[in-house]
Amino acid sequence: MTGLFRRLAIAACGLFLAAGLAEAQMEDRRAEGVLIADHVSVAPGSRVYAALKMTMDEGWHIYWRNAGDAGLPPQLILKEGTTLPDGAVGDFLWPLPHVIPVVEGEIMDYGYDDEVVFAFPVTVPADASGEIRIVAEADYLICESICIPETADVSLSLPVGEPIEDAAGGAEIGQWIARVPAAFGGEARFDDAVTPWTLSLRQPGGFPEGAQIRFFPFGHEISHPAPQHLRAGPEGATLSLTPDQFGQVEETLAGVIRIDAPGAEPVGYEIAATRGEVFAGTADKDIPLAPTSTGAGSSAEAGDPAALGWERIATLAFFAFIGGLILNLMPCVLPVLSMKAIGMVQAAATGHAGELKSHGVWYTAGVLVSFLALGTALLAVRQATGFATLGFQLQHAPTVAVLALVMFAVGLWLMGFFELGMSVQNLGGGLAAKSGAAGAFFTGVLAAVVGAPCVGPFLGAALGAVISQPAPAVIAVFLAMGFGMALPFLVLSFVPGLHRLLPKPGKWMDTLKQAFAFPMFLTAAWLLSVVAGLAGAGAAGWTLAGATALVFAVWLGRQGGAVRRGLAIVALGAAFIYPAVQANVPEAAISGSSQAAFTGTYGEAAWSPETVVEKLAEGRPVFVDFTASWCASCQVNKLTTLKTRKVQEAFTNADVAFLVADFTQKDPLISEELKLRGRAGVPMYLWYPAGASEPQILPELLTQELVIGLVEG
Amino acid sequence: MILSRRNFSLAAGMAAAVALTAGALIASTAEAAPSAAPGSMAPAFTGKTSDGETISLKDFAGKTVVLEWSNDGCPFVKKHYSAPPSNMQSLQKSAVSNDIVWLTVISSRPGSQGHVSPEEANELTASRDAAPSHVILDESGDIGRLYGAKTTPHMFVVTPEGELAYDGAIDSIASARVNDIAKADNYVTAALANLAAGEAVATPVTKPYGCAVKY
């Protein structure tokens, strides 16, 4: 009862401090805050990016610009010692938040956990000299189940002179700016004439298949915890919003939409919806709500429970039940059933019908208890690791890589390439050999235990959907699966004559087992494509190499001999670990598929001096984007200008050749060009009007008006 | 074939286990819709106080009632109870001296932060020199949900006629900093002043700030 102790301690010491302050001082801090920058030195009159980087303890979170029902957004309060004029330090660019269901269905917050970087622009005065200094206090409320207001003293000084970029700082800031919601390229309308309100999002072509969409309002017009039912069609999607009891919208309903598509990083767009009816083709079919993914490395946080209604749980339980039935056909279960259970049926069919029924019931109990244990274990793992999704959300490349290898290994095993689990089977077999009720019970346990590895990809999907749900849902699905598995034997024990209809164990089972290998290999192939999508072709290549190492390890292990066995184990470890490490690359600051609203013309071609000449010869105007993933200003320009719909449309209409010179890796050709144009680094934007031979060098800070003006001018 | 009754009930029990779990799930996700809105009648409730009494809202018909949701472990509550300036305590004293009923409600579920026994609640009142008319221990969270209390503090004012006149934050600066109290506009004081002058409450609804109620 530390709280009581603390109260006593405070009373005893006669401290009349704000207890909150005392608490904060007596406890360790829950978060570290530092200021980072994208430059190591800055030029007078330039604009650079700095950022407040917050690293939180496991399980603690801080808030988005709109904290939701409770909580407060973090702020940076400038203090004495700052050498910049008012307004030189800009506002935070808020990265895409995730939901924090505080009390399921009742209190909902929005925020971040683990790590977040709030970038902000810093304008260096034209008359600056020596160094610029920011001295500030990061004031933030940090919560787990309890909340603690904390402050962190942070400061940053940058020498003024020749501008030199800070690659590491710039990369980090750029990566987080890339997670700031860009302006929505489509149209948004809301209708508050009837309750629930609708928010209709028109985007020709619609949203990615299977995407979950949630609206995060800037204000409090809507009820934060209410589920936002989703409908979609070829022209976009429509959300239903429950108004807050006093919720009124003036002119526009503003906020951010978060799109979680399977196999892609979550992406956000800022919208300002105007009043109007639901767009045609955006509400054709209901999309069942999945638990809200909170992104990789999130705390153990169940999705919005209301998001997965009980009907859906019932559906999942039904499919789990069917899956349980299918388990009986799986080669790892059928032998057990055949050898043990069917033997019992045959023996008992000769006259102990009553005993047989109790056998059936005990067997069912054994299966259910095992599945209950499995479900509980899974919940415990989830609780302990905070890994709410077990990777089924398929957004964490290393997990997917390992999963692909596991599927491949299971396929090899089904093919009969190696033997596995004999010891488990024997252990259970010993217990199952007991006669009577205990024997029947342990036969059930055994069937469940040896059946567990056979839970194929089709059940993985159901588990993935349910694993981030509240505990009762998980348990319900597991029990349903167990019941499905136990049912045939239960029926058999009540209607003994049926056993004659059962297939006899035989060679066909091996054939069936081998046939099951192919879906496994196909699953592995699909997962490999997901790895490629998440972490690039290199990671996929390494995963394949891992698969080869796996086969090598098995082959070596089968030769026998201590040395070979040792080598085999090393190879086996490497087979899984190395691909996972390789897949764990920081994703590029801009991952094309998820970040770009308009990929049509963006990054159309790589820059080279020859390409410029060639395009100009075709009579096309040319825009060259000298950029790098570690350059924060470049990301801001992409976000606010280059990737916006208006600019992209202007480019398309004028048939502009858009060339990208990527300076992320050192490139002598690009260095040369930068020198030639008198620039120290990126960003640099060159604009060649049609027929021009020399480019105009654009300012480092682009605006839509400027670019559109040039293109249409 | 004859079913022995025991086996049949056992097998039925297995099937029922699945159904029951699903039922528990449905129950656990049921939503309680708060029904309080300024201008309408304040929801009637009955609760147990830290002195063991059972009180109802209708017991105070004819008097203005202030409801204060509280949790002594919450930094925002600590801010308003910290002495000096003893903001919450002075509000309570001035209200009670004007014949206004002040009800402090604790909706923390047992085992969560801020949940207190009746003795602890009274000890807190004494040690903080607080002066509520009653402290209601709302362990089930029913009263909190009835009013849609989201945060601690979250303040409500009920007119002598039983209408809800104010729902929202205690004041205008959402922070946990004690020195913001002096700079902020206190919405509860303003609402009580409006009612005393026979006027409509100028600001009947604000967004409450604080820690989430530990339902």
Image (cartoon, rainbow, N blue to C red):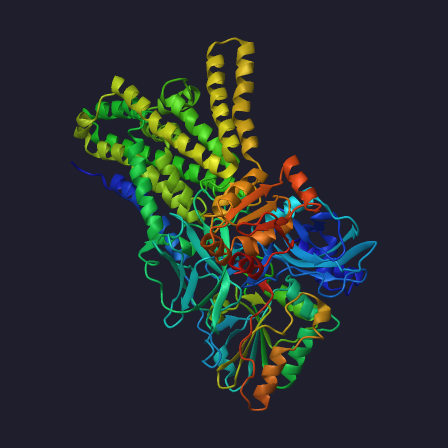
Nearer to us in this view, A447 or B188:
B188
Percent coordinates x, y for residue A492 in the rendering? 22, 32
Percent coordinates x, y for residue B131 in the rendering? 66, 76
Percent coordinates x, y for residue A520 in the rendering? 37, 29
Give the residue drawn at x 46%, y 19%.
A551
Nearer to us in this view, A321 or A224:
A224
Give the residue drawn at x 66%, y 51%.
A54
Q: Is residue A117 left or right of residue A157?
A: left
* Residue A351 appears in the figure: no
| Location of residue A605 with respect to A691 vertically, above or below | above
Q: Is residue B121 left or right of residue A181?
A: right
* Residue B176 appears in the figure: yes
Q: Quadrant of residue A456?
A: top left
Percent coordinates x, y for residue A496 in the rendering? 19, 30
Nearer to us in this view, A290 or A166:
A166
Q: Quadrant of residue A675?
A: top right
